[in-house]
Image: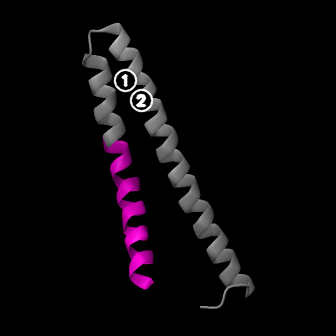
């Protein structure tokens, strides 16, 4: 069970670390594209990726806040 939890944690933090680089790369890809229809699709793709990355960031922040609050108030035993 601990191995699964650690794999999830490592995957989440890897995604959080790689997110800004992927957004910058996709942004440059959108800027270089000449075809307007493809450019519009790429912009939509970048926005969905940004939404997903920010959602993941919010989830990690809230989960850590909830865990620390639970530990400090005695609701979660270490």
Which quadrant would residue 10 be assigned to in this image?
A: bottom left
Residue at the image position 41 percent from the left and 29 percent from the top:
45
Residue labelled with disc 2: 45
Count of number-bearing discs: 2
Predominant SS along the magenta part: helix
Q: Which residues are magenta?
A: 1-21
Q: Quick check: 23 left or right of 74? A: left
Q: Secondary structure at mark 2?
A: helix
Locate the C terminus and report the quarter of the image it occupies: bottom right
- Position above or below: 35 against 67: above
User: Local crowd at mark 2 within 10 Å, few (<14), some, or many (≥20)?
Assistant: some
Residue at the image position 45 percent from the left and 76 percent from the top:
5
The disc at residue 42 is 1
Residue at the image position 63 percent from the left and 76 percent from the top:
68
Residue at the image position 32 percent from the left and 21 percent from the top:
30
- Position above or below: 63 against 23: below
């Amino acid at each position: 069970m601990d191995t699964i939890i650690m794999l999830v944690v490592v995957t989440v933090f890897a995604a959080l670390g790689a997110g800004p680089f992927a957004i910058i790369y996709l942004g440059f890809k959108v800027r270089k594209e000449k075809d307007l229809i493809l450019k519009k699709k790429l912009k939509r793709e970048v926005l969905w990726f940004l939404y997903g990355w920010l959602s993941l960031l919010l989830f990690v922040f809230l989960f850590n806040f909830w865990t620390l609050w639970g530990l400090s108030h005695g609701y979660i035993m270490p």
